[in-house]
Image: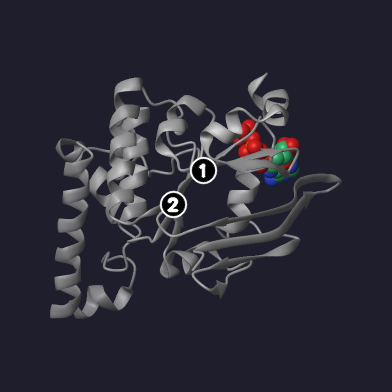
Amino acid sequence: MTLLAVDSLHRSFGSLVAVDDVSFEIEPGEVVGMIGPNGAGKTTTFNCVSGVLDSDAGTVTFDGEDVTNVPAYELARNGLVRTFQQTRELSTMTVEANVLLPTPAHPGERAWHAITRSEASQQREREAREQAMELLDVFDIRSKADEYAGTLSGGQRKLLELARALMLDPTMLMLDEPFAGVNPTLTTELVAHLESLNDDGLTLLIIEHELETLTDLVDRLIVLTDGRVLASGTPAEVTSNEEVIDAYLGN
Ligand SMILES: Nc1ncnc2c1ncn2[C@@H]1O[C@H](COP(=O)(O)OP(=O)(O)OP(=O)(O)O)[C@@H](O)[C@H]1O
């Protein structure tokens, strides 16, 4: 069964049509890249699909359920999680606290946990902490666990953002420019992490400008221009498509 189906999505800002009749489908286990020139509507499409912005028309179906305009926190519960182009770490909290933020087991989230401190809630906290530390270990930022997130480099912030998204145990991750501002060594590491997450069954939809980074990683590319899907296919198909070359690659 198709995991994500976007059908005839529209979103305008005043008279500007940012997303204009966009349709695409993602199958379970796929890695799909979304490319297109600046202003093509990639982030707005992400925002509408991930419940950050309401769409004006169209439908989004995730895992067989109509989730059109369902808020992000509810989508996350269903397994659809996204990251942002601008990382959203809280710079005056520690790296560990940042990773723990989205988990329901975080003590701050439910006031009554703090009061009752039931065995079950303490167990959940312990498990969340272990999971957070494992992720920081995998992403090679465990040594920074007790430091303020504000001290991390741009690349490490991307890893922190990814770790935080993974704490929600997603079925599908939508990544908005995960490699932007990341140095080549860290990019290679990040790609390897994404490949291994995909090997474990995680479905990925990735916005990226750097086509070279995406070509090896993705099964398929969706090209947007002027808010519309211009082409979709394997990297080889898309990069040899004349319309794509004119609209995007030729630039
Ligand atoms: N909140 C907003 N208010 C008004 N216009 C917006 C808003 N968000 C996006 N737009 C406009 O919608 C169009 C699509 O923008 P969007 O950010 O989705 O494109 P993009 O393909 O992600 O671009 P980039 O690669 O530069 O991030 C652009 O013309 C942009 O200026």
Neighbor class of circle 2 (other Cα within 10 Å; few <14, some 14-19, many 20+) is: some
Q: Is residue 245 above or below residue 77?
A: above
Residue shown at 49%/36% (left/top)? 177
- Ligand 1 visible in quadrant: top right
Which residue has dot 1 on it?
220
Question: Would residue 192 be seen by someone viewing this image from the given angle?
Answer: yes
Where residue 159 appears, as percent x and y from the top left, is: 32, 39
How would you rate the neighbour count of disc 1 (Cα within 10 Å): few for under 14, some for 14-19, many for 20 or more?
many
Asked whether the residues under the numbered discs 1 and 2 touch, taking CB atoms below 8 Å apart as contact, a structural biologist would say yes
Query: What sort of colour scheme is used for the picture?
Result: one colour
Q: Earlier in the sequence, mark 1 or mark 2?
A: 2
The numbered mark at residue 30 is 2
Residue 144 lies left or right of residue 205; in this view the side is left
Looking at the picture, tell me which residue is in the foreground, 33 or 114: 33
Does 116 appear above or below 80?
below
Tell me if the residue at label 2 has its CB under 8 Å from ligand 1. no
Residue visible at 64% across and 49% down in the picture: 45
State the quadrant of the C terminus: top right
Mark 2 lies on a secondary structure that is loop
Q: Nearer the viewer, residue 136 or 220?
A: 220
Image location (x, y in percent) of residue 40: 69, 37
Q: Amino acid at mark 2?
A: Glu
Q: Position of residue 173 (x, y in %)?
A: 43, 53
Q: Quadrant of residue 224?
A: top right
Q: Secondary structure at mark 1?
A: strand
